[in-house]
Amino acid sequence: MKSSDARRGKGRVSRAGRVGCAALGALLLASATRAEIVDVYVFDFAVSVNLPDLPVVDPVIYAGDTIRWVWLDDFHNVVSCAGQAEEWESDVFQAGDTFVYTFTVPGVYQYYCAPHGHDNFDGTYTGMGGQVTVLSVPGPGAWVVVGLCAVATIARRRRNAQAGYGG
Ligand SMILES: [Cu+2]
C-alpha cells in the first residue's frame, strides 16, 4: 500500500517535471529560431504598428526579425538616423508600397521621414519619424536554466523516493 503510493507519487512528480522542462525547452527553441515580420504603417504624419487614429506605438522586435513598413499615404520614406549600428533608407514611396529591413544588432534605432522630418545627427530626429527597439534573442545562458530544471526534477524524485511518498 505504502510502496505503491510512493511509486505512483514518484511517477507523478517525474512526469510533471519532464513536461515542465520540455515546455521550457520548446519555448526557448521557438524563441531562438523565430524570425517574424512586423508591420509598421506609414501615414500622414506618423509611423506606427497601429493603424491611423489609434495610439502611435513603436515596434519592439528580436534580432533576426524584419520590419515591413506599409505605406498608407503618399510621399513618405524611412531613413535611419546617422551613426547607428543598423542603417537603412527607403525610396520616397506611395500608398500601397512596402519596404523591408531585417535587424540583426540589438539596440534602439531612430529613423525619420526625409520629406517631413530630419536627422539631428545625434541619434535623434525631429518631425515625422519613429523608433525600432531590437532585443537580443535568448542566448546559451538560457539553456543553463533548462539544465537546472532537469537537475531539480531528479533531486526531487530522489527525495520523494527516500521519503517513501510522492508530492
Ligand atoms: Cu513623411
Image (spheres, rainbow, N blue to C red):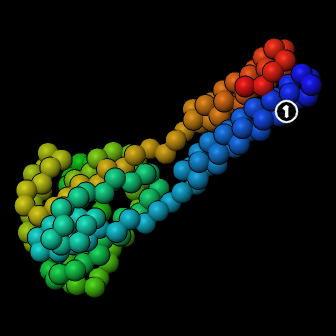
Residue 76 locus on image (x, y percent): 16, 75
Residue plotted at (18% across, 67% down): 54
Label 1 amino acid? Arg
Residue plotted at (78% across, 17% down): 159
Asked if residue 145 lies left or right of residue 50, the reply is: right
Residue that sits furthest to the front in the current view: 1
Residue 87 locus on image (x, y percent): 30, 57
Asked if residue 94 lies left or right of residue 40, the reply is: left
Between residues 2 and 133, which one lies in front from this camera angle? 2
Between residues 23 and 101, which one lies in front from this camera angle? 23
Residue density around tag 1, few if under 14, some if 14–19, many if 20 or more, within 10 Å: some
User: What residue does disc 1 label?
Assistant: 8
Q: Quadrant of the C terminus?
A: top right
- 147 up-or-down from 91: above or below: above
Residue 24 locus on image (x, y percent): 62, 42
Answer whether residue 85 is visible to the viewer in this image.
no
Q: Dot 1 lies on which element?
A: helix
Between residues 136 and 102, which one lies in front from this camera angle? 136
Residue that sits furthest to the top in the current view: 163
Residue plotted at (75% across, 20% down): 155
Between residues 101 and 5, which one lies in front from this camera angle? 5
